Image (cartoon, rainbow, N blue to C red):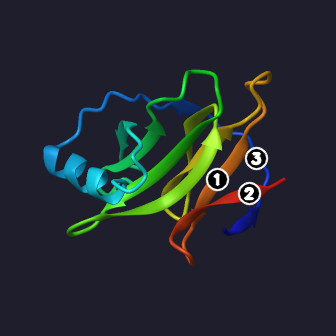
Amino acid sequence: MAVVSSSYAHASEPVFFNNTIAKSSLHKIQIFYSETGKNFDIAKVDLNNDGFYEFILKDRTCKDGHICHYAIITEEDESVSELATFDAHNISLSNHFTADFRDLQVFTNKTNDYDSTLYVWDNAHQIYGRVQP
């Protein structure tokens, strides 16, 4: 995992898991994760303003407020690839961009909603990386 140094404050917006995606996208996701046996709630979001959706997956069995497994994926021709995975009780999308991708705020402290870890796009590795304070 790439680690980047940075320090700044910025606005963010919540992620809404409504599971409304194209059947072809859902089929690719189901095939990719078929070995895990997990079911996911899915949010679609365009993280890099290219007109194509990336998907944020959250383990469906995880209850709100608990630490849950998340994955961020993108579609490729016949499958999907992971852009990030992490465990958190909540995530939000920053209005700040790094290398043309939206930054992510990942919340793991269940008692402090202002305590988050920033993940930014690492262009060299083509994944999200955690920012060191």
What amino acid is found at the position of numbered circle 3 in the picture?
Tyr
Whether residue 51 is visible: no
* Residue 62 against residue 98 in the figure, above or below: above
| Mark nearer the N terminus (1 vs 2) | 1
Q: Position of residue 38 (x, y in %)?
A: 41, 43
- For the residues labelled 1 and 2, the Cα–Cα distance comes to 6 Å
Q: Position of residue 63 (x, y in %)?
A: 55, 22
Residue 3 or residue 110, whichever sits in front: 110
Q: Residue furthest right?
A: 133
Instruction: Name the residue tied to disc 2.
Output: 131
Label 3 vs label 2, nearer the camera: 2
Q: Quadrant of residue 123?
A: bottom right
Left or right, 79 with respect to 48, comes to: left
Q: Position of residue 124 (x, y in %)?
A: 57, 78
Residue 102 or residue 32, whichever sits in front: 32
Residue 102 or residue 110, whichever sits in front: 110
What amino acid is found at the position of numbered circle 1 in the picture?
Tyr
- For the residues labelled 1 and 3, the Cα–Cα distance comes to 12 Å
Number of marks in the rendered image: 3
> Is label 1 in a helix, a strand or a loop?
strand
Q: Residue furthest left?
A: 23
Instruction: Name the residue tied to disc 3.
Output: 8
Residue at screen point 23% across, 46% down: 26
In the rendered structure, are the residues bearing label 1 and label 3 in contact, judged by CB atoms less than 8 Å apart?
Answer: no
> Is label 2 in a helix, a strand or a loop?
strand
Label 1 vs label 3, nearer the camera: 1
Whether residue 49 is visible: yes
- For the residues labelled 3 and 2, the Cα–Cα distance comes to 11 Å
> Is label 3 in a helix, a strand or a loop?
loop
What amino acid is found at the position of numbered circle 2 in the picture?
Val
Instruction: Name the residue tied to disc 1.
Output: 119
In the rendered structure, are the residues bearing label 1 and label 2 in contact, judged by CB atoms less than 8 Å apart?
Answer: yes
